[in-house]
Amino acid sequence: MSPRVRLVLFLLGAAGFLTTGVLAVLGAPPVGTDVHPYRDAAVAGALAHATANVVSTVNYDQRALDTLGEETILLASVTAAVALLRPADDERVDVPPPDVVRSRSPATRLAGWLLLPATLLVGLDVVLHGHLTPGGGFQGGVVLATAVHLLYLAGSFAALERLRPRRWAPVAEPVGALGFVGLGVAGSVAGVGFLGGVLPFGTLGDPLSSPTVILLNVAVGIGVGFGLVVLVAQFLRQEVLVR
Amino acid sequence: MTTLSPVGVVAGPIVVAALLLVCGRWLPRPVVDGVAILTTAAVGVSGAFLTPGAVTAGGWPAGVGIPLVVDGASRVLVTLVGTLATVALLFSWRYFSDVEAHFQGLVLLFVAGLGGFALSGDLFDMLVFFELMGACGFALAAYKIEEARSLQGGLTFGIVNSLGAYLTLCGIGLLYARTGTLGLAPLGAAHLPADTATVAAFVLVSTGWLVKAAVVPFHFWLADAHAVAPTPVCVLFSGVMAPLGVYGLARVHAVVFGALDVTVALTVLGLVTAVLGAVMCVLQRNVKRLLAYSTIAHIGTFVVAVAVSSPEASAGWLTDVVGHAGVKGALFLLVGVLLARHGSVDEIELGGSCRRSRGIAALMALGGLALAGLPPFGSALGKGLIEQAVPVPVAVVLTLVAVLTGAAVLRVALRLVGIGPLPADRADDVRTTGEGEERETRRLERLPVTMLAGPVLLLGGSLAVGLLTPGVLGAAGTALVDGAGYRDLVLGGVPPTTPPAEVAWSASGLVVGTAAAVVAVLLALGAVYAGRLPTVLRRRVPRQNRAVLGLERLHSGHVGDYVAWVFVGITALGALVLLG
Amino acid sequence: MSPVLLLVALLGVAVAGGVVALTRDPEKQAVTLSAFGLLLGVTFVLFDAPDVALSQLAIGAAIVPLLVMLTVRTVRRRQR
Amino acid sequence: MTTLLTVVAFGTAFWLVVVGAYGILRSDDLVHAVVSLSVAQSGTYILLLAVGYQRDATIPILGAGGAGSTPIVDPVVQAMTLTDVVVSATVTALLLALTVQIAKRHGTVDPDALRELRG
């Protein structure tokens, strides 16, 4: 199709889509409504299971199956990215150069080294308090992955390569998924249902309340953290090394 | 045990995949393959033993937690997923000799996605598994990274499917705004009236399923992805992934949108899909692409049956799905064998290549006959049931569609053994050829048994479905259209009492099926010998048949075109439901 | 949270999204995408969704633009 | 105010979906197409959060005393959006990886120049 025909076709289709959207919106209550039945059920559930962050109780308890699916999508995507970015039969991978980026100023390096432990701590905090405050395995995992890449800022690509995240991180990443399913099966075995809370719930707001949610957060944190390290490392490597 | 089994269908493959991805590097290849095959086989077997009922994760009540629902339909689909994946993995025993278990891992995660989609009783959770199927699917389609077309097909698949998923998510969000729930059964219990807002929500929610099912005009990605994916992956794509899209449509309509009459809309979309698939199928010379369009044609037939939404039609299309999966899977595997031996999937290049190994051509011909509707294959049984449930003119069109797709495969089989003159192998500017397809294995002089066992097993399976006329398919058909029964099962734990639809041969079905097979043979012979039908079309298309050429030009491989068509499809579906 | 702020943020998101989609050069797009991600994060805060905002800021404003940037540089080198 | 918010929120959501799709349509670079796809997806975030929004409600964190007198906004849509954000990022990464390989194999990432699959 010529770009013009394509555009006309799209505009017609988009008009239909917008009409459909408006019709669907007209059947729904306005934005800002105070009628949220599922919210009420979720809050009751959060209270029963002593999880202060209601989003966490939805993600890791009431609708934990969604999160299992999501964690699996992450595992699949990372595996796929590694498989797709594998060196093809006719490609060669350059030996890591002594230092690809030489122009780092001492100040940047210092900032990198200083930020590294701080970021790691923040990441751990976000993972471990996801049941109380905003955050959890996903957000914390991303922060942890970022921390590893501060090495790039602090040292160089060579320093990052020396860590060889490409080698060990793909092996570490599925451990997150294994932990998640393992906790789920523990629920089945204990008779509270797959992904049910096995351990005593504790008191709302307590740092160790809803321990199952904490453990699931840790599992997801492992998966997301290592997964993103692998992803970024793969792309960096394509950019720097593969010819 | 009951609480574990539907969960195991999803969690089992994920655990094994994760383990293989961790240890794959250190395990010997046969162990990796063996473990993966055992896992998919277990999924297939467990499908037959799942007890009907709903298991909600975490023990929450339905409406808060997410139920995995076992009923007649989801059992059949889980069995089909496991079986096809087992055959696909057996066939790929020698494939992709890379050290790590990426391929097996992705197939297992794909199986978890397919199984989860079939079992989930929650709209958003269905979408999550849909995206899991998608992510694994894009990667598997593009797995042959040395091959340019494979990558392009994978990316197109990725973009169009993701867009479909986002549009479905818009629909889910707006439906949630209206009802305050995400579970299929609670949504059904909300008894949505048949007003315009419900129509709009139905259209948006259905978009993703229609893209996955490759219903016209959402279908463009399918031929591009199927034609380039590794052969064992094609088996899963055509055999079960596309039909699961139709399942999503049927399930969500029956349980949530039961008040909407979509008979006219889905009949129209289904017929257009069937006819377009059949025409495009006949025009192909890349055999994988030919089979892909044949799948689109059969999907059209399924959608027509969904439109009828009677237990008989429903049992018919589910039977056809199983029968078709066996036949189409066998055909794809045979093409894979040809690719391994001759390094091509092009009909003209392969001409005469099976003069000494007629077994392959004979199996392919058998597959072609089964697609056309030859009894007693399962595909013919299902087709007969569908044709009895629809109006006569519609049934005639569907029969012709089946004949055309069967004839196209028969034509290829005839040319393989060197019957008839080959058309000139001219450069083609309209059509994808089958040249330059990368081998998926080392060049094979002798075929390993696992490679030929696959097609034989699958054809045998399709035959067995036709001969045994299993009652589970009737129960599956009834369950899929029984929205109230589904609600009772999930919300009240009451198994349905409605009697299963009867799955049996009818005299007319036997006669029409046999006649269709004969006509398909005649058409194929005509095409090969007189060089008339497809060849003449191909040579004289620019002057003679502008409509066909235009149709081919529409399949441009341009992702922008495909995106435009998705939106056109939404508009068309909406208009058809409102006017129908 | 004041709906007026929310309205302004939403309009900003709408404009920024348009800019990202209409920026033809992918290298510049990585920058606009990052800004768009940032703006989305702010909007999520105004929607009282700190969990989502946190992940959007980390992923949408940082990781994804980084991947886009790396891809653009790899792709540029490969183009004939 | 409520009507205005409804119009603006859903309008923004649909606009992002459409403009993202338009970006894919007009794209002359697959990287651009993949980024545009993620813009289309961000429309779904806005839509979901708008659906769960409640005026004068607080963030979905319960105080130590349990549910207070102030209601919270809907946490379910937030959990869905969170899932959506992560899925989006991983799928985008996957599609970008494919784009890298296409650049290697085809020597171009212009959809208009990828003419091998057709008919």
Image (tube, helix red, strand yellow):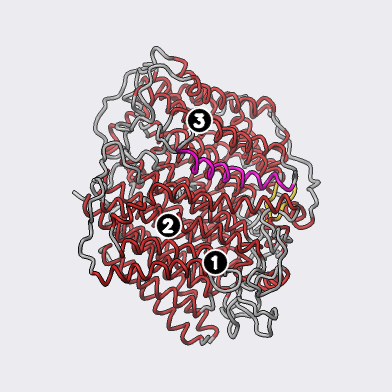
The amino acid sitting under disc 2 is Leu
CB within 8 Å, label 1 to label 3 = no
Question: Where is the C terminus of chain D found, in terms of image quarters?
Answer: top left
Question: Could you give the CA–CA distance between mark 3 and mark 2, rounded to whole angstroms?
Answer: 50 Å
Q: Nearer the viewer, mark 1 or mark 3?
A: 1
For residue B213, side relative to residue B95 (left or right): right
B314 or B247, nearer to the observer: B247
Question: Could you give the CA–CA distance between mark 1 and mark 2, rounded to whole angstroms?
Answer: 16 Å
The amino acid sitting under disc 1 is Gly
* Above or below for B579 versus B75: below
Are labels 3 and 2 assigned to the same chain? no
Instruction: In the rendered structure, find residue A228 and report the number of the disc placed on it.
Output: 2
Q: Is residue C70 visible?
A: yes
Q: Which residue is pictured at 49% across the width and 68% down the height?
A: D45
Q: Secondary structure at mark 2?
A: helix
Q: Residue furthest left?
A: C80
Please give the chain letter of the residue carrying mark 3. B
Please give the residue where the numbered disc 3 appears in the rendered image.
B403
CB within 8 Å, label 3 to label 2 = no
B7 or B251, nearer to the observer: B7
Find the magenta span and give its range: B3-25
Please give the residue where the numbered disc 1 appears in the rendered image.
A136
Q: Which residue is pictured at 32% across the width and 29% down the height?
A: B536
